[in-house]
Amino acid sequence: MRMIRRTALAFALPLLAASAWAADGEWHHYGNDLGGTRYSPLDQITPANVSGLQQAWVYRTNPGETLKTHLQVTPLMVGDALYICTPSNQVIALDAETGAQRWRWEPPAPNDRRRTCRGVTYYKVPGGVGACAERIFSTTARAQLVALDARTGKPCAGFGAGGMVDLKTGMGEVKPNYYYVTSAPVIIRGRVVMGGWVADNQHVNEPPGVIRAYDALTGAFSWAFDPGRPEYHGEPLPGQTYTLGTPNSWAPMSADESLGLVYAPMGNATPDYWGAHRTPESEKFTSAVLALDAETGALRWLYRTVHHDVWDYDVPAQPTLVDLQIGGQPVPALIQPTKRGQVFVLDRRTGRPLKEVEERKVPQGPAPGDWLSPTQPFSTGMPDFTGPDLTEKSMWGLTPFDQLWCRIKFRQARYDGPMTPPGIRPSITHPGYLGGIDWGGVSVDPVRQIMIVNWSRMPNYTRLIPRKEADAMGIKAGPMGYVPRKAQAQEGTPFAARTSAFLSPLGVPCINPPYASLTAVDLSTGKVIWSGPLGTARDNGPWGIPSMLPLTMGVPAIGGSVSTRGGLVFIGASMERTLRAVDQKTGDILWKARLPVGGHATPMTYISPASGRQFVVIAAGGHMALQSPLGDYIIAYTLPKK
C-alpha cells in the first residue's frame, strides 16, 4: 500500500538530538534519549530486508489474570535486559534475546488498583558499585516512587523508606484513583522529576498538579513546582498542602542536561469544560509547556498552547528536543505536539517560536458565567493536523439510517469550526479529547530532518448540564471517577458535563474517514513529505464487531512511532491489530505482523548482545476506549540468524 501526497525528500545538514543515544544499540529512556526523539541509530533492519522480520518471542505479563486496563508500556533496554511495568504495578526484567523473565517485583500492598504505566526509568549512580549501582524507578497506583536494583529487582534500601517515597506527602486528601503517575519519571542532574495524572472533571478541589524532584540516590525531597505558588519550591508547612485543583503534568517530560532544564507538558485545571472559577495562576499554566530549572524547580519560561482552555486540550505529548538548522546555525529547538493538532516549534532556551504562530479569532459565546479568549494561537509555520472542518454533508454512516441520525445530531449541535465552545446546547469539538495528537507524540529522525506524526480525526459531542438537572440525574463525583451516562460531575461549578466521541447508534464515527493518519514532515521546510490513512477496517465495525474487511480507511489509533537510521518507521497504534514497518522516504508499508490485540503503545528497538541482532518490541495490550480487547503481551521481532 502506498501513502499519498508524496513530494521530494529534502536532505540537509544533520540535526542533533538534545542528548546522546545509548551506546551499543541500547534504549535507556522512554523516548530513547532525554529529548524524546524516539529515534534509533540502528540500521540492521532496512527497507531491503524488513520483509524477513519474524517473531522472536512473546512474554505474557499477567497470564490468567482478569485484566482491567490496558498495557501501554515502552520497554527500556540496558545491557542484556529489558525493563517493563504493568497496570498491576509489577516491574519486570526480561532477557533481551529470549524474553525469559529475569526477575519480577511485586508491590507490598495488594494489587487492588490498576493504572496505566507507560514506562520505567533507568539510572546509573555515578561511580556506584555493588547493590543498586544501577536502578530502575517506577511508581504505583498508591502514589509511591520505587527504586529497584536493576540486577536483582530488590528495593534499594537507602532510597526513601525501604526503597519507596510516598508521593501523597503534601497532597491533602487523595481519594483512590484520583492521583498517580502514568508516565516514566525523568532523571536529570541526579534528580528524579515527575508530575502526575489527576482524575478529570470530578470537582474543583481535586489533588494538586504539583511537579516534584527527589534525589535519585537517597529519595530526599529536592524541590517542587506548585502552579498555585510558582515562587515557592519547598514542601508545604504543617497543616498545609500544595494548591488544590491546579493544572497537572501527566504526559512524559523531556530534559536537556547541557541547559539544565526540564520540559513539562501541562494539563488543564480541574474541571475541563467550565473555567470561570480558575485563579490567575491556574490560567497561566493551563495547557502550556514549561521549562523548569532542574536544580531548583524555578520557572525559566512557559508557552501556552491554549488560552482559557474549556475543551480538554491539555498538552498530552512529550516535548521532542532536536537541534534545527536555522540561518546556517544549529538552534536548540523543542517540538510540542498538541491535541488541537497544532505543532509548535520553540527555541528550548527561551520558549520563543521558531516557526510562525498567529493569534486568530475563534468562536465566541461562552457558557453562562464563563468567558473565552477572543483569539487562540495557530502554528501556521507547520502543517495543521486537524483535517478539514466538519459539515452536515461530511456526516457519515454505514447505512442511510445512521447517516441520517448523524446529520440530525449535527444540526442539533453548535459547530462553528475549531474552538467551538461548550454550552447548554450540545456542541461539537473537533479535534476531540483524543486529538489531533495524543500521548503517542511524534518521532523525529534528527539526521534526515523528518518528523513522523500519528494523528486522529475524532470529534466529541459535548453538552453542559445545569447543576439542578445534574443533581436530579444523580450525577456526582465518585471515588473511582465514576461518570453515569457518560456524564462528569464538575462539582463546584454550575454545570456537569456530558462528552464522548461523536458516534452513530451503530458505534461508528459520524464523520467520514480517515480517522487516523500517518504523516511525514520535512522539518527544514515545514512541508508534508507524504501522508496517508493508518490502519484497515479488519478489526472494527458496528457495535465493535470486527468487519474483517481489509480496506485501508484509517481507523482510530492511540500510540506512537519509532524512526530508525535504517530508514524505517515502526508503528502499531491503530484499531487494526497490526505492527507495521513503513518506508520513511515514501510512506510505503513494507511489512506487517498480526498482533493478538491492539498495539496501543510505542515500539522500541535494540541490539541484543547475545546474537548481535536488532530486535523490535511492542506491547500489545488493547484499549477499552477503542473497543479493543485487553491483553498482556510483550512481543519481539528480529531477522533470522545467519
Image (tube, rainbow, N blue to C red):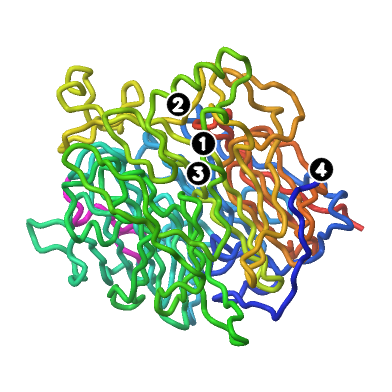
User: Residues at badges 4 and 1 in contact (C-beta under 8 Å)?
Assistant: no
Q: Decide whether residue 105 is among the magenta residues.
A: no
Disc 4 to disc 2, C-alpha distance:
34 Å
CA distance separating discs 1 and 2 = 9 Å
Instruction: Name the residue that disc number 2 marks.
Output: 410
Residue type at tag 1:
Leu
Reading the image, the residue beneath label 3 is 86
Across and down, in percent, residue 395 comes to: 55, 27
Badge 4 amino acid: Met
Q: Earlier in the sequence, mark 3 or mark 1?
A: 3
Per the image, the residue denoted by label 1 is 390
Q: Is residue 492 above or below residue 550?
A: below
| Res. 91 visible in picture | no
Residue 114 position in % (x across, y down)? 41, 37
Q: Residue at left 54%, top 60%?
A: 30
- Please say if 553 is above or below 187: above
Total numbered circles: 4
Circle nearer the viewer, 4 or 3: 4
User: Disc 2 and disc 3: Cα gap in Å?
Assistant: 40 Å
Q: What residue do we see at 50% from left, 74% from top?
A: 354
Instruction: Report crowding for label 1: few under 14, some 14 to 19, many 20 or more residues within 10 A (C-alpha).
Output: some
In primary-sequence order, the first of circles 4 and 1 is 4
Amino acid residing under circle 3: Thr
Q: CA distance from mark 4 to mark 1?
A: 27 Å
Asked if the residue under mark 2 is in contact with the one under mark 1, i.e. CB atoms within 8 Å, the reply is: yes
In magenta, the rendered stretch is 159-173
Circle 3 or circle 1, nearest the eye: 1
Instruction: Please indicate whether residue 619 sits to the left or right of residue 150 in the image.
Output: right
- Frontmost of labels 4 and 1 is 1
Circles 3, 1 touching at the beta carbon (< 8 Å)? no
168 is higher (above) or lower (below) than 533: below
